Image (spheres, rainbow, N blue to C red):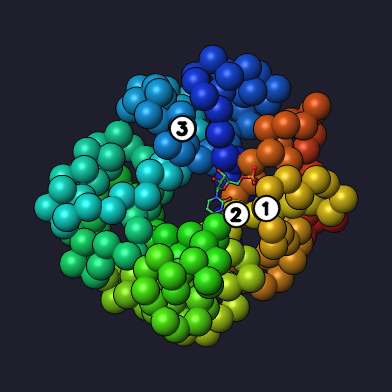
Amino acid sequence: MNSRPVVALDFPSRKEVEDFLQHFPKEELLYVKVGMELFYQEGPEIVKWLKASGHSVFLDLKLHDIPNTVEYAMKGLAKLGVDMTNVHAAGGIRMMEAAKRGLEAGTKEGAETPVLIAVTQLTSTSEEEMKRDQLISVLLEESVVHYAECAEKAGLDGVVCSAWEVETIKKKTNQDFVCLTPGIRPTGSAIGDQQRVMTPQEAKKIGSDYIVVGRPVTKSDNPYEAYLSIKKEWNGEK
Ligand code: C5P
């Protein structure tokens, strides 16, 4: 289990990120998630800057393309020094294998290859939508587990999933296979547009390896305090 909750930097530009990070003491090194919104505005420089400040970076771009394209895209992302990144499992085993090869090829000698995880079914997808739009006729959970097994076969380190899926996925995969779970809300906070949420304490109990937290920290009046409180709960210190 990673002791630091991953903070989702869902901001439109670097300016907002800088303002947000000002709430934290310089020595508090964070594990942050940079998603499409920020990356497509600021580009690779935002990752380089966060890394130079000492933070760890999960670059959440959910790649899904032909194996060759994904392989060389991943090679470039590894060169940026990201700590974790991801693909869509729907791209297939060959695409996931290519992603891993690309990451390995782009990792500087002596450095650790970034953690590579797969998105299974987006948690925004309902079973009805999956059946109708993807023409997948099994239960949603079966599809999620199948994608997780494909990711494991391809040599990936784990999956992004709903905290509610962790126990099932863990039963079907090896011990080291990690589950990263968004949709985390500290007890008593606003749920926002998330449907099925879990507290950090519950996520820890069911065996989640990384939790992603956005608005409970980014929209808080005191982000540092909110972060520390979630971190404590996640580490079983309160
Ligand atoms: O603000 P909140 O804590 O809901 O943010 C969660 C973060 O995790 C957001 O960046 C969101 O896009 C992301 N995410 C999610 N559910 C998924 C995958 C990613 O909420 N299934």
Q: What element carries label 2?
A: loop
Q: Earlier in the sequence, mark 2 or mark 1?
A: 2
Kindly tell me whether mark 2's CB lies below 8 Å from ligand 1.
Answer: yes
- Residue 42 quadrant: top left
Q: In the image, is 189 to the left or to the right of 68?
A: right
Where is residue 140? Give x, y as percent.
50, 76
Badge 3 is on which residue? 37
The circle on residue 182 is 2
Does residue 161 appear in the picture of this structure? no
Does residue 74 appear in the picture of this structure? yes
* Residues packed near mark 1 inside 10 Å, few (<14), some (14 to 19) or many (20 plus): few
CB contact under 8 Å: marks 1 and 3: no
CB contact under 8 Å: marks 2 and 3: no
CB contact under 8 Å: marks 2 and 1: yes
Badge 1 is on which residue? 194
The structure residue drawn at horizontal position 40% and vertical position 23%, both measured from the top left corner, is 41
The structure residue drawn at horizontal position 46% and vertical position 32%, both measured from the top left corner, is 37
Kindly tell me whether mark 1's CB lies below 8 Å from ligand 1.
Answer: yes
Of the two numbered discs 2 and 3 in the rendering, the one whose residue sits closer to the viewer: 3
- The quarter of the picture where the N terminus appears is bottom right
Foreground residue among 176 and 119: 119
Amino acid on which disc 2 is placed = Pro
The circle on residue 44 is none
Q: Is mark 3 on a helix, strand or loop?
A: helix
